[in-house]
């Protein structure tokens, strides 16, 4: 039975994050702080949701809201403990056949980068060099596309081609 109220709350939380996200990358410190406040507030609320309901699966909140729960965890960069908790719960969900392996891979990479370690799947971009997105360091980069394929991610070159600045 889908919890419609919880689903809508997760969607609303991430809508606010998305609205403020351009400011997070700007030179406007007020906008950066506004986005930071939202991601921390969203992370705090996701922790409460997890305490009350477990991981927000598609069965609990519907497919889109489940994706939005992952997005909250993905953006909780200042709450590494929450990201690690979400990773553990999402791993269980994926192993039970009820989660998204690509989201799990992206969160895993995000945590590794936040810990200052090389990522595995090359999903986290460090910046743009000569108009081309460049990933944070990656473990065994020559095998990255093979690992990406194993979790359902497209080859890195195809991914960056879609996200390269116009």
Image (cartoon, grey):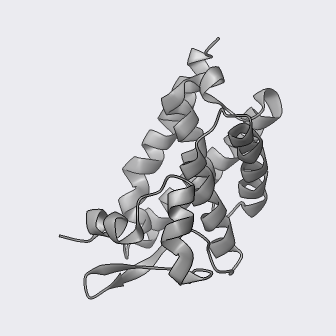
**Residue 76 visible somewhere in the drawing:** no
Q: Nearer the viewer, residue 30 or 32?
A: 32
Q: What residue is drawn where x is 69% and y is 80%?
A: 117
Q: Nearer the viewer, residue 147 or 118?
A: 147
The part of the image, by quadrant, that contains residue 158 is bottom left
Left or right: residue 89 versus residue 28 is right
Considering only vertical position in the picture, is 111 above or below 61?
Answer: below
Considering only vertical position in the picture, is 103 above or below 135?
Answer: above
Expressed as whole percent of the image width and height from the top left, the position of residue 48 reads: 76, 37
Q: What residue is drawn where x is 73% and y is 47%?
A: 91
- Outermost residue toward the right in this view: 51
Q: Nearer the viewer, residue 93 or 4?
A: 93
Expressed as whole percent of the image width and height from the top left, the position of residue 124 reads: 51, 70
Image quarter of the N terminus: top right
Q: What residue is drawn where x is 68% and y is 71%?
A: 112
Q: What residue is drawn where x is 50% and y is 52%?
A: 152
Left or right: residue 27 versus residue 119 is left
**Residue 28 visible somewhere in the drawing:** yes
Tally the marks. 0
Left or right: residue 148 versus residue 82 is left
Considering only vertical position in the picture, is 42 above or below 58?
Answer: below
- Outermost residue toward the bottom in this view: 130
- Outermost residue toward the top in this view: 1
Image quarter of the C terminus: bottom left
The part of the image, by quadrant, that contains residue 113 is bottom right
Expressed as whole percent of the image width and height from the top left, the position of residue 66 reads: 57, 34
């Amino acid at each position: 039975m889908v919890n419609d109220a919880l689903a809508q709350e997760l969607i609303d939380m991430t809508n606010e994050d998305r609205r403020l996200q351009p400011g997070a990358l700007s030179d406007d410190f007020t906008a950066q702080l506004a986005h930071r406040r939202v991601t921390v507030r969203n992370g705090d609320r996701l922790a409460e949701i997890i305490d009350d309901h477990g991981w927000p699966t598609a069965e609990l909140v519907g497919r889109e809201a489940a994706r939005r729960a992952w997005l909250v965890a993905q953006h909780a960069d200042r709450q590494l403990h929450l990201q690690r908790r979400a990773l553990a719960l999402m791993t269980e969900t994926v192993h039970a056949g009820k989660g998204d392996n690509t989201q799990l891979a992206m969160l895993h990479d995000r945590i590794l980068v936040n810990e200052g370690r090389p990522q595995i799947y090359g999903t986290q971009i460090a910046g743009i060099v000569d108009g081309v997105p460049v990933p944070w360091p990656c473990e065994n980069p020559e095998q990255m596309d093979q690992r990406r394929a194993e979790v359902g991610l497209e080859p890195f070159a195809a991914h960056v081609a879609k996200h390269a600045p116009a």
